[in-house]
Structure formats: structure tokens, C-alpha cells
Amino acid sequence: MASTEIIHAHAAPQGFIRKYIFSLDHKVIGLQYYFLALIAVFVGMGLSLLMRIHLIWPNANLPIFGAIKPETYLMFLTMHGTIMVFFVLTTAPQGGFGNYFLPIQIGAPDMAFPTLNMLSFWTTFVAFVVLVAAFFVGAPLHGWTGYAPLSAVPSAGPGEGLGADLWITSIAIFCAASLMGALNFITTVLDMRAKGMTMMRMPLTCWAWFITAILGLLAFGVLLAAGILLLMDRNLGTSFFVPGGLNFTGQTSFPTGGFSSSTDLIKHNGGSPLLWQHLFWFFGHPEVYIAILPGMGVASQLLSTFSRKPIFGYRAMVYAMLGIGILGFVVWGHHMFMSGMSPYTAFAFSIMTMAIGVPSAIKTFNWLGTLYQGRVRFHTPMLFAIGFVSLFVSGGLSGPFLAQPVLDIPLHDTYFVVGHFHLIMGVAAIFGIFAATYYWFPKMFGRMMSEGLGRWHFFLTLLGTYAIFMPMHYLGLAGQTRRYSEFTQVAYQTKLIPLQTFITYAAIVTISAQFIFLFNLFWSMAKGKKATDNPWEATTLEWTTATPPPHDNFGGRTPVVSHGPYEYSVPGAARDFVMQNDPATTPAH
Amino acid sequence: MGLALLALIWLITFVSTYFFVAKTWWFPVGASASAAWIDHQFAVTFILMGIVFVAAQGALGLFVWQYRDRGATQPVHYSHGNAKLEIIWTVLTAVLFIGLNLMGSRVWATERFDPPEVGAVPVEATGLQFAWYFRYPGPDGKYGRTKAELEDASAGGESAVGLDPSDAASKDDIVSGTMYIPVNREVDLALRAQDVIHSLFIPSMRFKQDAVPGLIIHMHFKPIQTGDYEIACAELCGLGHYKMHGMLKVVSQEEFDKWLASKEAEKQ
Ligand code: HEM
Ligand SMILES: [Cu+2]
Ligand SMILES: [Cu+2]
């Protein structure tokens, strides 16, 4: 830790480009990640709107887009999933808030490797540009999971040519960026903590970012390798994922496709489509925890702060996150119960998956325990943290259904799954991002966001997302398969269209409500009430420094930490909170 | 604000639970031997998870209202947690989750570990962009050879699956776009795919299995109710995924025999 001063002796940069574009300051980089994710989430959301509209009115002639074809629906689907998972849920919570607040919360002047940090952001940015480029050449239709051979053979469908190459390239670049980021986060936590900031005094947000980084380091490497193998299958004639004897004659008999090929016998041999699935989900399952862990950290931080009560079971929370992190690497097969994988293996994966439910349940109990006998303040960030818990419970409890192979027989690849993962990974994680935005906005921009607009945003969004995603579970039970661009072809599915229509209306309302947030965000930057240094009366180190924090975070001081992160309502203390850097003589544990 | 939150969370919980309990949208009636088992396991899981769902959401709503900030005089219980409680709920959830899992595993084992019964009806299902074809080996009980280079989807039927007429065993093979099977006999199903992954999904049979290029996957199930049942494709296979559906006709043994015989006659 002694070396930190030397590494970070870089002076505050002058000039617009060094200050805001190629900045080495973790705070600027954090904001860059955040705004990249903000652009991405509105693109992803716009696509979901088009998808929902097409599902109900498949022949509608939309302005600009015209009539959406089946393959166009699937392209939107692929882009929506990919953008949301990679460029929103992996980018904002970790790259955005993690970058901005991890160093400050542990009392460091910057990340361990500022240049690597900058590089990792700009690499992510390039990945995004490459992905968007796929739009212009025809995006792939293979979904965010890109199962081979659909994703491996250009003649498998429109968009599986150059579009698919760009899609894979984008993901590979994203992996490289995430690996850089992960290394940086891990080193920073291990090496840069201020005096007195022991691991067990770190805010749970820092634990979450730390564990997320470890997951990222182990998971993205595998996806990177898988992506490169897939690119080789596509372009160099290798056969990792493509078996012999494939013949793509099907499209010729498909009249409305706008795509046709004559008999197209593929010259591959010996590859395994299941290998792709194993590699993908070895990454993919940890990825869902990468998306949600920072949200868990934020929820813990906020529930404690706004209940004016220490977090219930700090150690249990840390162990639960570690448990989730470790178990998260041995459950990937639960995505493959119906894939043709050995049924004995399914059995093992299923037990592991049920086991991972346990630490998740512990977290929920502890959040409820934190609220219990507290003094709850309903500022907007707290509302979203409470919403997070509700969504986490709702999304989490459909897990034990899907984790049992027998129940996965009727449920796999139906809307039950779409409902499940949107609630827990999509919306819960987004609520984590909203909560974090409302909570840290004053520190980042020196002004408060509007509470009135925040409440409207919260109530509409919570109600709206439940209205969209809860009915999807019912659709799944009734056998509605996912990734269908219309529900008109299978007789029993046409009966479900009224409920589908309800979902589309709910989506239109919910998506519109997000503009309240967008307005609040930008309006408050310019016109919001001026914020004090510690508007929430919170205890962690970011609230001890100026608003916004100076270039080196603490203005030449180095904080010394004497207390745990959640000392609220300590008996005998002068105020109802004890800051982490208050003198050791202040009563607290 | 506390009251509004309580109302909203409880309302969401009530409405969500109501439609599950009322079964407004639900599984189609099960028509296979294993359907009752699967539905039972679902019901058990549903009741247990339902209790946890209502309890957790109920407590969340209640706590935020009951412990809302009523001014500085309101006491706050200063506590860092309770190790005994942590252990209790860890053990309870572990028992609940793992127990559920073990209960369900028997059904899974009979579904997927055991081979089909002797005397099962052999059927081969082939998925291709974007149709299902079903093949019956005929009186010789043997599937004839198929060749990828002979496949021609636009021609349909035998040509679609690439049946090689030069193989003697293929002479009596029947290929049909509709799946016929006799009631109360197990089906010995062999799944194959010619281009990308497809998934044969028959909701009423509680049956689903991916068809993977390069693999022949053996499955079995036993219909116990005659009738017409829809088949859908459950794995994204390309632009026509949504229209890749088919029909399963479960008929009496006599009808099945008659159907097969007429198909054989057609072929000669
Ligand atoms: C306004 C909110 C949203 C709406 C209305 C929405 C709607 C949809 C729809 C209609 C589908 C396609 C379902 C299908 O055809 O099978 C889908 C898929 C998906 N969504 Fe969302 N979504 C929303 C937000 C999100 C968020 C926040 C995430 C972040 C994780 C997300 C991640 C995904 C993923 C990963 C898929 C699967 C894509 C695939 O099948 O390859 N969505 N969403
Ligand atoms: Cu998973
Ligand atoms: Cu399909």
C-alpha cells in the first residue's frame, strides 16, 4: 500500500481531450461507461418495443421500419439480448459505478492501473461500434446465445454471413476489455485499500465488485476462446462446432423468406454443437451473476443506509456472495437439460443449481432482517432498492422450477424462462442501476435528482415490469415457445394472444415511463438542488469527500478507517451514523 | 409512502398468485404416462415456492410500512445480525431445495435413464428447416440408410430426409409429415436433425428434446389418451422457427395398423 502514492502521482490533466475523452481518472472513465450503457439501454429498449409490437401486429406497416419480417424480428431479438447483457448489465454496474466508487469507497486515489482502465473503456466502446455495425449489414438471427450450427454456417439464414462475423468479433473484443477491467478491479481491491480498511470493513458494494471481477476474469477468457473457435469454423474451415453431413436445403421450400439457397451441403466434419453450448454457458451462467452481484451490493448498501440500521449479517452476506461466485461455475449445465447432454450429468448440475439457491435465499433473509426494526426513509434510491428485493424474490423463486430437469421438460425454452430471466437478471439488475443512479447522482454531479419524478418513475416501472414479465410465466406454462416472431401458426398458441396483447400494452407504458428518468437525469444535472457532501447521512468514504470529488478523490488527504461500513444508530453516538473514518474513540463495533 | 409501497407490493403478490392458483393459463391436459408425475412434482414445487413467495413479499411490504421513519424518537434495534438465525434459515432452505430436487429425480430417471419398454413402437423424428418428418422402419424393423447429399426439403417426404432407395432396408420405410402412434404403447423415438438444432416439443405429452445435428438421440414416452396433439419447435432454428410445427395423432392400435398398411400399399 505504500507504493500507491508513487503510482498515482500523476497530476490533474489539462485540456478537454485528456480530461474528458482519453482520461485516466477513474471517475471520468466510470461516467464514460455509464453513458455508453445509457445509450445502449435505450437502443435495447427501443428494439424490445418493436419486437412487442411485431408480435401482436405482425403485418403492421411501421413508420421507418415498414413491415417487420420474421428474420428481422430475430435480428432485433439477437441485438436486444446482446446489447442488454453485455453493454448494459455488464457495463453500467461494474464499469460505471464500480469504476467511479470502488476506489473512493476503499480510500484510494485511483484504480491500480489507470492506463489499463482507459484502454478497457475504449475497447468496450469499439466492441459496441462493431456490434452496431452488424445492424447495417444485416444482424444475425441466432439469439444472444448463438448456438451452433445456426451461428457457424453462413447459409443457415439471413444475417448469418458478415453480420454474424461482426457479432462474434464484437463479443470477442468485449471479452478482452472485460478481462482488462477485471484485472484492474482485483488488483485495486487487494492493493489499494486505505489504512484501516480491512477486507471485512469494505462496503458490500466493494465486495460485490471484487467478486464480480473474479467471475469476469474466469468467465470472459472462456467466451473469448469460444468466440475465436467459432470465427475459425466460419472462416477458416475448421470444425469445432459443426458436425459432418449437414445439408441446408430447407429455405428453398420456405416461400416468404426473401432468402433462398439451393442444396448446400456443408463441408465440415467431426465438430460438436454441444461443445459450443458448454463453452458458452460456462461463461453464460457466471455472467448472470456478473450482472446481478453489483445490484446485490447496492441493495445491501442502500437498505442499511435508509433503514438507519447496520446490515443484518455482514459476514453472512460476504460468504453468500463468495458462495454464489464459486457455485456459479458448476451449474452451467442447467441450461442444457434438453440438449442431448447425458441425463446423469443433468442430475449433478441440478443438485448444484438447487444449492446455489441457498446463498441467494440467505441474502433475501438478511435484507428483510435489515429492514426489521429499522427506521425506513423513502428516498428514491431506497424505493428502487426495495423494488430490487421484491424482483429478486419473484425472479428467484422460479429458479427452483427450472433447476429440476423433470420440470424443465415442459418449461425449457418457453416464455416461463423469458419471464424468469427478465425478472431476476434483467429488471432486478436494472433496478440496481436505477438505485445506484439516484443514490450516487449527488456525489457525481453535485446536485440532487428530483424526488417527485423519481417516485413516479419508480411506481410506474415496478408495476409495469411486473405487468410485462409476470404473465410470461403463465404463457410458458401454457406452452408458449420463445423466440417466435408470431403466434399465429400453432393453434394452441393463438389462444394466448389476448394475454400477449396485454403484455405489449404494458411494455408501451413502461418504456414510456423511462423517459421520466431520462428527463430527471439531465434536468437535475443542470437545475437540481445543490447537494451537500453527505445528503443521505451515509457512512462510507465517498461521503467524506467533496462533491464532486477532486481529481485525487480526497484532496491530498489519505483517509484512515476505524469503523465498519454500516454503523447506524449506534447506541451512545452523537448522531445516528458513524462515518468509517470517524476517530476510533467514537462508540461503535 | 410506506403505505403506498405496502399496497403495491401486496397487490402485485396477490394478482400474480391469483392467476397461478386460478389456473387461468395452465398446462394442457396431460396425455402421457409420465404427465401425472411431472404435474405432481410441479404442484409440490409450486406450493412450496408459493408459500415462500407470499411470505417474503408479504414481509417486505409489511416491514417497510411498519418500520417507516416516524421521527428521531423511533427506536432502532442496533444489531449486526444473529448467527443462530443465519444457520437456521440456511439449513432450512438447503433441506427444502435439495429435498425437492431429490423428489423429482425419480421421474427424471424413469424418463431418461431407463431404456424404452420391449415392444415399443420405433419412430424416427427428423428436424430440418422448417419441418418435422417422422419415419417408421416398416415390417423389417430396420431403418434404411439416409444420405445428406440426397436430402431435398422442397421435395418433401422421403427425399426430405434423404432416404437412400438403393438400400434394401429402406424399401419398406414410411416417411410421414404427421406423427401417428398407437395409444398405450411406448414410443421408441430416435431424434435427428439435418441442418441446425431443433427441439421436438409436445406439450400434452410433457415431452421435449432437442434434435442435434450429428447425434441420434433416443427417447421414449407413452401416450395414454387418443387424440390430436400439436407439436412445436422449441429451439431457435432460423427465420421459420415460429412456423415449424406438426401434429401428433394418437390412435387405437387397429387404426395405427391400418394407417401403416395403407402407407405401405401406397409405396409399392
Ligand atoms: C422494457 C423492457 C423489456 C422488454 C419489453 C423486453 C422484451 C423482450 C422480448 C419481447 C424478448 C423476446 C422474447 C422471445 O421472442 O423469445 C426479449 C428477449 C431478451 N431480453 Fe428483453 N425486454 C426488456 C428488457 C430487457 C432487459 C433489461 C434485459 C437485460 C438482461 C433483457 C434481456 C433479454 C435477453 C437476454 C433476451 C433473450 C434474447 C434471446 O432470446 O437471444 N431484456 N426481451
Ligand atoms: Cu445459468
Ligand atoms: Cu425451431
Image: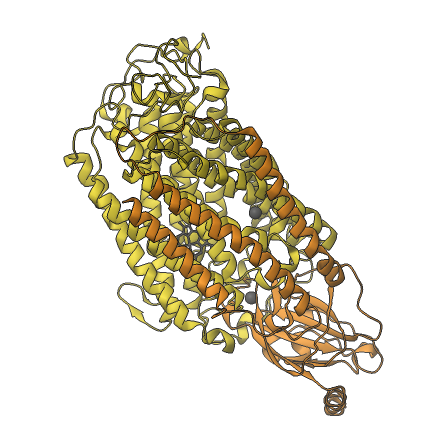
Judge left or right: residue A126 versus residue B200: left
Location of residue A151 by image quarter? bottom right
Picture coordinates of residue B144, whole percent (x, y): 79, 75
On the rendered image, what quadrant is the C terminus of chain A found in? Answer: top left
Residue at image location 19% in from the left, 37% down from the top: A524
Q: Is residue A120 above or below residue A523?
A: above
Picture coordinates of residue A136, whole percent (x, y): 37, 54
The colour applied to the residues of chain B in this rendering is orange
Please name whichever residue, B108 or B191, is drawn nearer the observer in this view of the structure: B108
Picture coordinates of residue B193, whole percent (x, y): 66, 65
Is any atom of residue A84 visible in this view? Answer: no
Residue at image location 25% in from the left, 45% down from the top: A455
Please name whichever residue, A372 or A261, is drawn nearer the observer in this view of the structure: A372
Judge left or right: residue B126 versus residue A12: right
The colour applied to the residues of chain A in this rendering is yellow
Residue at image location 39% in from the left, 72% down from the top: A498
Picture coordinates of residue A135, whole percent (x, y): 38, 54
Displayed-image quarter of ligand 1: bottom left
